[in-house]
């Protein structure tokens, strides 16, 4: 029996990964409506796509009555941000959201609040030590982000992550590198309860990014994916432009020192993230024809066409329909 499906209320073992700046309301709703679990990324909803958070949630609810989730980025950065995230969590709960993915912090306070509503919290992890923190804080499951993921990726393979975290006896979701039925099946055979896909859902009709971004994903191979620390201070997977050297995306000098400093790394990450928020808004501009930061994971290797969300989920489940 698949514990993820049983407890989340979705039809298929698929999570539509929360993506900044790509998670527009129509995309999130389409994922859920097609039988997967669409996840609201609040910074994308509000800062990029311009919705008041409550109005954005209500709009998503008008598009689907099926389960949706919420991504809570809980790293301590500024008191103002922490209060805003806390308020967003309350609103999401009031709107009937019962599945939360926590990232970049200790999720104990989120777990307490969500459990009071009968909801679930899955914690993002890239290695066992973060998984142990999540489990100690009461997380119900783990989103295991491997070294093929887009966005903030891990350093371990899907198999290594599963082997390292299996003994914690929590349902695990594989995040990274999946774009087709074979990849999904392999992860389920390993023992994962579900897979979280992000990059595959950017190249969809429902995703409101520029056509150039979608085409970059269609054209890219896994060898075109590199890492940059210059976006958020934490390695992020992007499609490297052919004209640029990988070293241009690495942190050097004073920036590298600040990112390693226990005293300055959090404020440096906040500064870089705010700067990236402004720069990345351009990717949803229909006229955008280039970017240094097309975020994507190594699943680009299996993406060769822009499809609808429903078509993708049917293909993932090996159930294509005309």
Image (cartoon, rainbow, N blue to C red):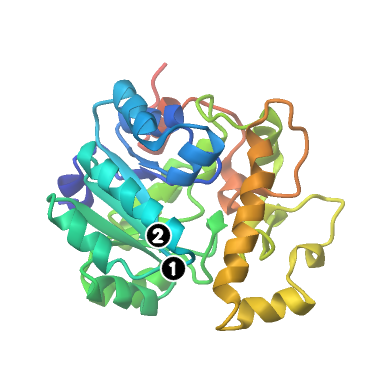
Q: 268 above or below 119?
A: below
SS class, disc 1: loop
Residue at (13% x, 49% y) in the render? 117
Q: Are marks 1 and 2 in contact (CB under 8 Å)?
A: yes
* Residue 279, percent from left and from top: 69, 46
Query: What is the crowding at mark 1: few (fewer than 14 residues within 10 Å), some, or many (at least 20)?
Result: some
The numbered mark at residue 290 is none
x then y, percent, for residue 71: 38, 50
Q: Is residue 218 visible?
A: no
Quadrant position of residue 125: bottom left
Viewer can see residue 110: yes
Left or right: residue 192 compared with residue 125: left
Q: Secondary structure at mark 2?
A: helix
As drawn, is 251 to the left or to the right of 192?
right
Q: Is residue 284 above or below residue 300?
A: above
Residue placed under numbered mark 2 in the picture: 82
Tally of marks? 2
Which residue lies at the image location 43% right of the left edge and 63% below the top edge? Answer: 79
Residue underneath mark 1: 76
Identified at 42% across, 16% down, the residue is 322
Query: What separation in Å lies between label 1 and label 2 (alpha carbons)?
Result: 7 Å
Foreground pick, 211 / 61: 61
Does residue 309 appear left or right of residue 289 in this picture?
left
Tell which circle, 1 or 2, labels the residue nearer the N-terminal end.
1
Estimate the x, y position of residue 32 in percent, counting from the top left: 32, 33
Q: Quadrant of residue 174?
A: bottom left
> Crowding at label 2, few (<14), some or many (≥20) Cα neighbours within 10 Å?
some
Question: For the view shown, which residue lies furthest in the top direction?
Answer: 322
Point 25% across, 68% down: residue: 108
Q: Residue furthest right?
A: 243
């Amino acid at each position: 029996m698949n514990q993820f499906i049983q407890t989340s209320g979705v039809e298929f073992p698929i999570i539509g990964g929360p993506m900044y700046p790509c998670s527009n309301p129509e995309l999130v709703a389409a994922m859920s409506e097609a039988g997967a679990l669409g996840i609201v990324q609040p910074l994308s909803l509000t800062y990029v796509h311009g919705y008041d958070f409550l109005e954005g949630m209500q709009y998503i609810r008008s598009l689907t009555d099926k389960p949706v989730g919420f991504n809570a980025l809980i790293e301590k950065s500024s008191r103002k941000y922490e209060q805003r995230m806390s308020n967003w969590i309350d609103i999401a709960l009031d709107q009937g959201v019962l599945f939360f993915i926590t990232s970049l912090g200790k999720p104990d306070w989120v777990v307490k609040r969500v459990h009071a509503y009968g909801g679930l919290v899955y914690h993002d992890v890239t290695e066992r030590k973060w998984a142990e923190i999540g489990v100690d804080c009461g997380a119900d499951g783990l989103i295991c982000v491997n070294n093929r993921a887009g966005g903030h990726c891990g350093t371990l393979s899907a198999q290594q992550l599963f082997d390292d975290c299996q003994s914690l006896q929590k349902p695990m979701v594989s995040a990274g590198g999946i774009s087709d039925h074979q990849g999904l099946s392999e992860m389920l055979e390993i023992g994962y309860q579900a897979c979280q896909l992000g990059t595959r859902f950017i190249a969809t009709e429902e995703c409101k990014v520029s056509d150039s971004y979608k085409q970059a994903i269609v054209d890219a191979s896994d060898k075109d994916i590199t890492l940059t620390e210059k976006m958020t201070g934490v390695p992020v997977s992007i499609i490297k432009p052919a004209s640029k050297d990988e070293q241009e995306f690495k942190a050097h000098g004073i920036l590298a020192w600040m990112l390693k400093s226990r005293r300055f790394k959090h404020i440096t990450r906040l500064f870089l993230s705010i700067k990236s928020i402004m720069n990345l808004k351009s990717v949803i501009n229909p006229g955008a024809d280039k970017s240094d930061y097309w975020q994507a994971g190594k699943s680009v290797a299996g993406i060769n066409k822009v499809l609808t969300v429903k078509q993708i989920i049917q293909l993932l489940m090996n159930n294509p329909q005309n």
